[in-house]
Amino acid sequence: MTFAEIILVGNVGRDPELRFTQSGTAVCDFSLAVNRRWTDRNSNEQREETTWFRVTVWGAQAETVNQYVQKGKQVLVVSDRIEASAFMGNDGEPRASLEVTARTVRFLSGGGGDGGYSGGGSGGYEEAPSDVDDIPF
C-alpha cells in the first residue's frame, strides 16, 4: 500500500475559472503561490522562493471555491494527487508546471471581512477562524 498527501498554504495568484464538463460536473482552476523563506547561512540574508501550483477542484466544492475565492486570498489545499509536466517557454527555455487536484480547499483569509469558509469534499460549509493564528497547526 502506498499513500501520498500534499498540503499547500499560499495565496491565490489569479481569480478562479469555473467551467462544466459535458455531463454537468463543475470544474474550477486557480493558481496558488507558495512562499518559502529562509536565512542564508553564508550571508545571513533573508531569502524567499515562490513555487506556483495550478489547482483543480471538482464538483460542488468547485462552485464554492469559484464563489468565495479571489486573487490574493490565502487558502489551504489538501491533495493526494500532484503532477509535474515540462514544457518550452515563450523564450525557448524549458519550464515546469506543478498541478494538483484538490481534495479539500480551506479558506484561511476572508479578504473582504467575511471570515472565510471551508469547502470540504462533501460541499458543506464550515466557519473558518477569522485569525490565521487560531489554526491548530
Image (cartoon, rainbow, N blue to C red):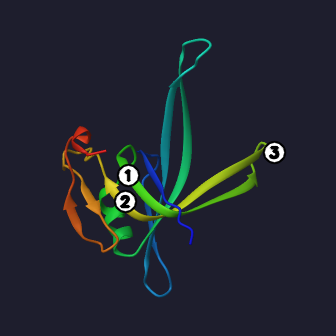
Identify the residue shown where x is 19% and y is 50%.
Answer: 114
Give coordinates of residue 129: x percent, y percent: 20, 48
Q: Earlier in the sequence, mark 2 or mark 1?
A: 1
Cα separation between marks 3 and 1: 33 Å
Asked whether, in this view, residue 86 is left or right of residue 6, the answer is right
| Badge 2 vs badge 1, beta-carbon distance below 8 Å | yes
Q: Which residue is mark 2?
A: 105
Marking on residue 76: 1
Which class describes the residues within 10 Å of circle 3: few (<14), some (14-19), or many (20+)? few
Mark 3 touches mark 2? (CB < 8 Å): no
Q: CA distance from mark 3 to mark 2?
A: 34 Å
Q: Is residue 96 above or below residue 121?
A: above
Q: Secondary structure at mark 3?
A: loop
Residue ID at (21%, 40%): 131
Ranked by sequence position, the earlier of labels 3 and 2 is 3
Identify the amino acid type marked 2: Val
> Earlier along the polypeptide chain: callout 3 or callout 1?
1
3 or 1: mark nearer the eye: 1
Three-letter residue code for mark 1? Leu
Check disc 1 and report its element: helix, strand or loop.
strand
Q: Check the picture and name the quadrant holding the C terminus.
A: top left
Provide the residue designation for mark 3: 92
Quarter in which the N terminus is drawn = bottom right
Residue nearest the viewer, comparing 117 with 137: 137
In this picture, residue 132 sits left or right of residue 98: left
Q: Residue at x 26, y 46 (%)?
A: 136
The residues bearing labels 2 and 1 have C-alpha atoms spaced at a distance of 6 Å
